[in-house]
């Protein structure tokens, strides 16, 4: 099977099985999504969605959050992983939004990564979800799933994975493919004991093929 055939199969499968795939984070504005994505680092979306309503109620705008103190914000974040760092990042992010971007969330990766707590993955999420830009955010799910299936070969870093996926997925689908791979990794191609028996991608999956050979 060629690389193109594998990609064509996977894309066709997801287009039929998950045509409306989207983030599971709950938000009402680019600012709220940015807060949620910063909080989601090494934390589940479920936990983030349980935490953010209180944050958004008290700090509905970048201006309000920029004026918060660590002692005020921390209690609302303490159930999230790495709450000390994320408290500082959120306040610093809001302050920079006000100072440099007039309170608006920028929509370029280069500008977003200037914000505290925002790396390339987060910037790719924001621009692809809000603006449907052809940017591929690579988290642990995307990294694992793309390698297992065989969409990426020899990619040792998230950036290498990102580049290979972008090269082979049609530009108009990249923003959606991000969600396909994340959700597949979250619910089917899980880290331990992946659910290969019920996976519709197994006909083209290198990982499944290797398992079958061992049997």
Image (tube, rainbow, N blue to C red):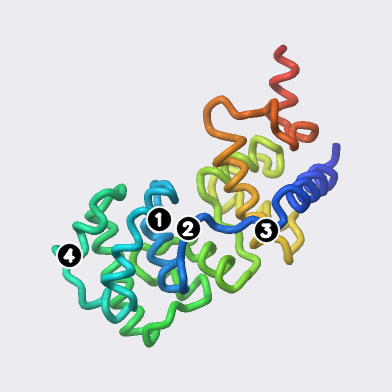
Q: CA distance from mark 1 to mark 4?
A: 21 Å
Instruction: Answer left or right for 81 relative to 15.
Output: left
Q: Quadrant of the N terminus?
A: top right
Q: Position of residue 125 (x, y in %)?
A: 53, 62
Q: Tell us which disc is closer to us: 4 or 2.
A: 2
Classed neighbour count for the residue bearing mark 1: other residues with Cα under 10 Å, few (<14), some (14–19), many (≥20): some
Between marks 4 and 2, how big is the CA–CA gap? Answer: 24 Å
Mark in front: 3 vs 4: 3
Residue where numbered disc 4 is placed = 70
Residue count near mark 4 (Cα–Cα under 10 Å), binned few <14, some 14–19, many ≥20:
few
Vertically, is 148 above or below 89? Answer: above
What x and y, as percent, mark residue 105? 44, 77
Circle 4 — which element?
A: helix
Q: In the image shown, does 41 or 46 lie closer to the viewer?
A: 46
Q: Earlier in the sequence, mark 1 or mark 4?
A: 1
- Which residue is denoted by mark 2 in the rendering? 25
Asked if residue 162 is positioned above or below residue 5 in the image, the reply reads: below
Residue drawn at point x = 63 percent, y = 47 percent: 181
Q: Distance between the Cα atoms at labels 1 and 2?
A: 6 Å
Q: Are marks 1 and 2 in contact (CB under 8 Å)?
A: yes
Image vertical order of residue 26 relative to residue 100, above or below:
above
Counting residues from the start of the chain, the first of labels 3 and 4 encountered is 3
Expressed as whole percent of the image width and height from the top left, the position of residue 106 reads: 47, 78
Task: Report, in whole angstroms, how far the alpha carbon at label 3 lies from the one at label 2.
Answer: 15 Å
In the structure shown, which secondary structural element does the residue marked by tag 2 occupy?
loop
- Front residue of 78/139: it is 78
Hey, which residue is sitting farthest left in the picture?
A: 71
Q: Which residue is mark 3?
A: 20
């Amino acid at each position: 099977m060629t690389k193109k055939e594998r990609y064509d199969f996977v894309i066709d499968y997801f287009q039929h099985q998950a045509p409306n795939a989207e983030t599971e984070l709950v938000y009402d504005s680019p600012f709220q999504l940015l807060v949620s994505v910063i909080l989601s680092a090494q934390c589940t979306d479920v936990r983030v969605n349980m935490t953010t309503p209180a944050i958004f109620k008290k700090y509905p705008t970048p201006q309000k959050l920029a004026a918060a103190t660590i002692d005020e914000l921390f209690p609302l974040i303490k159930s999230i992983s790495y709450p000390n760092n994320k408290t500082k990042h959120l306040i610093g992010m809001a302050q920079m939004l006000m100072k440099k971007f007039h309170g608006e969330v920028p929509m370029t990766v280069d500008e977003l990564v200037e914000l505290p707590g925002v790396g390339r993955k987060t910037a790719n999420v924001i621009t692809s979800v809000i603006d449907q830009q052809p940017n591929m955010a690579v988290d642990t799910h995307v990294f694992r799933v793309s390698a297992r299936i065989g969409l990426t070969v020899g990619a040792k870093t998230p950036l290498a994975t990102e580049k290979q996926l972008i090269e082979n997925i049609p530009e108009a689908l990249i923003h959606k493919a991000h969600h396909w791979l994340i959700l597949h990794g979250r619910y089917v191609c899980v880290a331990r004991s992946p659910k290969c028996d019920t996976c519709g991608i197994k006909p083209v999956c290198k990982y499944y093929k290797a398992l079958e050979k061992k049997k």
